[in-house]
Image (cartoon, helix red, strand yellow):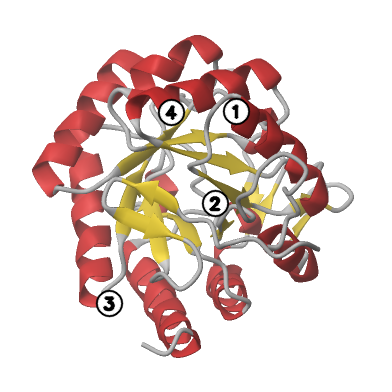
Amino acid sequence: MTQTPPRLCSVAQIRIGPAQPLAIIAGPCTLESLEMGIEVGKHCKAVCDSLDLPYIFKASFDKANRSSISSKRGNGIEQGLEHFAAIKQELGIPTTTDIHAPEQADAIAAVVDLIQIPAFLCRQTDLVVASAQAAKAHGRGLNIKKGQFLSPGEMVGPVRKATEAGCDNLMLTERGTFFGYHRLVNDFIGIADMMELDCTSFTALGPPPVCFDVTHSTQLPGSGEQTGGRPDRAEHLAKAATAIGVHALFVECHPNPKEAWSDGATQLDFDAFEQVIAQAAAIAKKSIGQ
């Protein structure tokens, strides 16, 4: 494969990529309220600050992909973006959230620093193009999560779409691959391959940085009225992903996961979050010689 210069993804003042500190993207699955978002953001920021790790707050204003029609989805884009702006101002941190439709792109990019394309939607051309164009216009980053149904190498398709739409400031996220029913697996050889994704046919830049989604990788999808999970395995996955050199970790965190509006079976409580990030930080700092 042709050698190309390392590519970084810029999210406000944070640089994600080779030779950079391990970035942490963390927060509640759903932005249930402004007060809860600030509470979680403060905790995650304090943990990351104590470990000298850059931190990006995440949450969703709408969970469009739910197991049940009666499940809580969030407070909607208008109130959600108001809350993101308030959290950003209150805590002085970059933010990220999901996008679900092309017409949301400009409004999201006007507020948050990193637009996230959900895994199930990573092949939706209109969504990728609109997100890439909005990210470019507002100086934001774009995070494309790998579909549970795709091989790592197939992520060259979404990267090409985003690049041809004008956005080079992007990253990819691994969140597990379907392995039969009710099970996700993480292919660490495949993750390493995605970190070396060959994009030379359409750009002079190297492969995008890769983030590892710790908590969604512990899901047991479709295993009932609500998605199940194995959050007790989060620390093992985080350590393994950090050891192979991923550039960021994505972790959902909640004050009381059992009461969360969504992903209660996989989100980490505050103590577990701190433990997982501390262990990953020790591995990351050793691997880059800090």
Q: Residues within 10 Å of mark 4 (few under 14, many from 20)?
A: some
Neighbour class for label 3 at 10 Å: few (<14), some, many (≥20)?
Answer: some
Q: Nearer the viewer, mark 3 or mark 2?
A: 3
The amino acid type, in three-letter code, at marker 1 is Arg
Q: Earlier in the sequence, mark 2 or mark 4?
A: 4
Q: Are marks 2 and 1 in contact (CB under 8 Å)?
A: no
Give the amino acid at mark 3: Leu
The label on residue 51 is 3
What is the CA distance from the residue labelled 3 to the residue labelled 2? 27 Å
The residue positioned 54% from the left and 18% from the top of the image is 130
Q: Residue at x 55, y 62 (%)?
A: 6
Q: Of the residues tagged 2 and 1, which is closer to the observer?
A: 1
Which residue bears the numbered disc 1? 66
- Does residue 79 sit above or below 239 in this rendering? above
Real-space Cα distance between discs 1 and 4?
30 Å
Among the two numbered marks 1 and 4 on one chain, the one whose residue lies closer to the N terminus: 1
For label 2, the residue is: 265
Indicate the secondary structure of the residue bearing disc 1.
loop
Residue appearing at x 40%, y 42% in the figure: 260
Q: Given the image, on which type of amino acid does mark 4 rest?
A: Lys
Determine whether the residue tagged by mark 4 lies in a helix, strand or loop.
helix
- Rounded to the nearest whole Å, what is the CA distance between mark 2 and mark 4? 36 Å
Task: Please tell me which of labels 2 and 1 falls first in the chain.
Answer: 1
